Amino acid sequence: MKSGRFIWITVVLLVVSNAPCVNASEEKLIIIPTRPKVTQPFLLIRPTDMPVASVILFAGDHGRLALSPQGIGWGSSNFLVRNRYRFAREGFWVALVDAPSDLPQGLWNFRTTVAHAEDIKHVIA
C-alpha cells in the first residue's frame, strides 16, 4: 500500500513540475509586419518580475509551429517549445518564433538568409 502511495505522489509531483509556470504572465500571440507583404508570428511570454534578459526560441525541424489564437499547431513536444515557461520562470523575456507568413511549408534553407535576419530583427525590436 505504501509503495502505491509513493508512486502516486511521484506522478503528481512530476505533473506539477512540468506544468506551465504560474509566475510568468500569460503568453501572447503577436503578429508583426517584417518584409513587404510578410508577417512574423511569435509567442511572447514576459516574466512576472523584472526581466533579466531576453531569449528567442526557434523550434527545430521545419520550424513551422502554426501559431494561432487557439494555440500551437505543431511542435508542442519540441524541447524549447515545451520549456518556454521555464525560461520565463528564470526571469527571461521569451519570444517563441514561428515561420513567417510567406513560408507555410517551414524554414527549410531559410534560417541562413538575409530575409530571416530581417524578420528576427523586427522580433527583437
Image (tube, grey):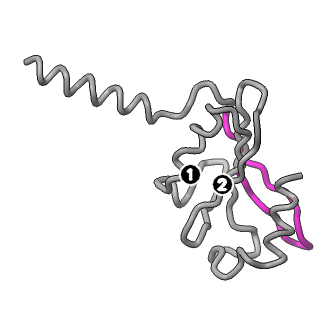
Q: Quadrant of residue 22?
A: top right
Above or below: residue 27 compared with residue 109: above
CB-based contact (under 8 Å), mark 2 and mark 1: yes
Taking the image as shown, residue 112 lies to the left or right of residue 65, namely: right
Residue that mark 2 sits on: 57
Could you tell me which quadrant the N terminus lies in?
top left
Mark 2 → mark 1, Cα distance in angstroms? 8 Å
Dot 2: element:
strand
In the foreground, 87 or 36: 87
Residue kind at label 2, given as amino acid type: Leu
Region rendered in magenta: 26-42
Q: Position of residue 106 (x, y in %)?
A: 63, 74
User: Where residue 35 appears, x then y in whole percent?
Assistant: 89, 71
Which residue has dot 1 on it?
A: 81
Q: Up-down: is 94 above or below 57?
A: above
Image x and y of residue 113, in percent:
78, 79
Crowd rating for badge 1 (residues with CA inside 10 Å; few <14, some 14–19, many 20+): some
